Amino acid sequence: MEEIFLDAQLRQETGRGKVNDLRDAGFIPAVIYGEGAKSQAIKISAHQLIQLLHQHRLENAIINLKIDDEKKQKPRSCIIKEIQYHPVRGNIVHVDFNEISLTKAIKVNVPVVAKGEPAGVKQDGGSLEHILWEIEVECLPTEIPKEFEVDVSALKIGDSVHIKDLQIAPNIKVINDPQSVILSVAAPIKEEVVAEAVEGEAPQEPEVIKEKKEAPAEGAAEEEGKEKK
């Protein structure tokens, strides 16, 4: 597995005003969480993190945090727990790291990537439906797959790929149901054809059904005639 290193410093700045000043200075506030350990506030270079995001897929990558204040210690092995973005500007405002042990299995979500164009799409006009975008697995941090690649070229309309169809290494435990559908090819949607009116013909109006009036009963008609007189 490729080694990824990221410089960090212990952070004393807390509170909205000081944290905003920290961001203006080119840093991103972050926190390291560890199992059974107290969380630790740090700050990292915004420029360095953005470079790493462009070069690597960091969702499940092991990041070795080199903290300046801990020069005598080895870099701390972490994975990114969450990256928070500004809702309007879109820039990174905070990062959460989880410190991990390289000898203890962890649960992570691994992305699923479709490769190729299904025969049912290319030849029959169907559509590829990507139903499950991630698969949860449990394994050692050093054995986390980068992604699960699925070749969909041979799929015809009605065909599906399930988790059980994937070639997954025996040292990786899948948490999801093996019967879960990952990808499938659906038939093209048929559009309902509306009959066009023939030129020169007036559109047919709906028939109006008039209510039939009942004839007045014998005797009632006579009384009605007397009243008119």
Image: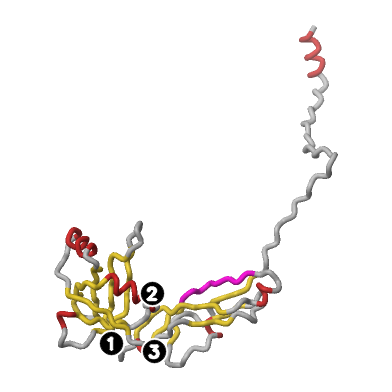
Question: Residue 133 lies in magenta, yes or no?
Answer: yes
Residue span colored magenta: 127-134
Q: What percent of the width, then of the height, locates residue 85?
A: 33, 64
Instruction: Count residues near mark 1 (Cα–Cα under 10 Å), then give few for <14, some for 14-19, many for 20+.
Output: some
Residue 201: quarter of image = top right
Is tag 2's residue or tag 1's residue first in the polypeptide sequence? Answer: 2
Instruction: Find residue 143 and name its label.
Output: 3
Instruction: Find residue 29 and name its label.
Output: none
Residue where numbered disc 2 is placed: 54
Is tag 3's residue or tag 1's residue first in the polypeptide sequence? Answer: 1
**Residue in front for this viewpoint, 133 or 9:** 9
The reply, left or right, for residue 60 in relation to residue 187 is left
Quadrant (top left/top right/bottom left/bottom right) for the C terminus: top right
Q: Residue at x 82, y 25 (%)?
A: 215
**Residue occupying the far top of the picture:** 229
Residue 217: quarter of image = top right
Question: Residue 153 lies in magenta, yes or no?
Answer: no
**Residue in front for this viewpoint, 172 or 3:** 3
**Residue occupying the far bottom of the picture:** 170
